[in-house]
Image (spheres, rainbow, N blue to C red):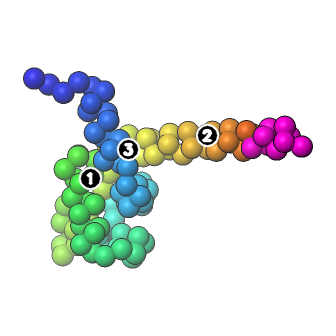
């Protein structure tokens, strides 16, 4: 029996629900990066980064390949970058709405 679409989407969003994973995806938007560059940018333990990359790889969100001695990671599809951009737009709207609500609350309190 196949998984309902809403369940598959929920699983994907759960996979994205970790700050290190989001940061990795942001860094990969500009193209493939070696693990060592990701480590330098994110500043976490290598074992922790390895675990997070494995989660993203198992979910099919990133792919990896060898380039000589380097292990390179890249987004599996440009749609991942589109999703991150949509998340930024949504977050911007939500935060704007909260700022507006805060102004309204302050005006009512005075």
Q: Quadrant of the C terminus?
A: top right
27 relative to 103, above or below: below
Kindly identify which numbered label has been placed on residue 56.
Answer: 1
Q: Secondary structure at mark 1?
A: helix
> Which x, y percent locates residue 90?
56, 39
Report the Cα–Cα distance between label 2 and label 3.
21 Å
**Would residue 56 be seen by someone viewing this image from the given angle?**
yes
Q: Are marks 2 and 3 in contact (CB under 8 Å)?
A: no
Q: Determine which of the numbered discs, if any, sits on residue 12 in the image.
A: none
What element does badge 2 sit on?
A: helix
Residue beneath disc 2:
94
Q: Is residue 37 visible?
A: no
- The quarter of the picture where the N terminus appears is top left
What is the distance, in whole Å, between disc 2 and disc 1 at their CAs?
27 Å
Give the mark toward the camera: 1 or 3: 1
Mark nearer the N terminus (2 vs 1): 1
**Where does the image place residue 80, in percent across and percent down from the top left?**
38, 44
Q: CA distance from mark 1 to mark 3?
A: 11 Å
Residue plotted at (45% across, 46% down) = 84
Magenta span of residues: 102-110
Closer to us: 110 or 83? 110
Residue situated in front as seen by the camera: 13 or 71 = 13
Q: Disc 3 on helix, strand or loop?
A: helix
The magenta stretch spans residue 34 = no
Name the foreground residue: 72 vs 96: 96
The residue at which mark 3 appears reads as 80
Q: Is residue 106 magenta?
A: yes
Q: Quadrant of residue 53?
A: bottom left
| Image coordinates for residue 3, horizontal then vertical, percent | 18, 27
Considering every residue shown, the one lying at the far left of the view is 1
């Amino acid at each position: 029996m196949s998984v309902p679409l809403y369940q598959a989407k929920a699983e994907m969003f759960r996979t994205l629900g970790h700050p290190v994973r989001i940061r990795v995806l942001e860094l990969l938007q500009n193209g493939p990066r070696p693990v060592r560059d990701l480590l330098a940018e994110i500043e976490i333990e290598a074992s922790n980064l390895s675990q997070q990359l494995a989660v993203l790889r198992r979910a099919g969100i990133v792919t990896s390949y060898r380039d000589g001695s380097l292990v390179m990671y890249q987004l599996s599809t440009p749609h991942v970058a589109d999703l991150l951009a949509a998340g930024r737009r949504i977050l911007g709207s939500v935060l704007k709405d909260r700022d507006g609500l805060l102004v309204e609350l302050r005006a009512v309190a005075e």
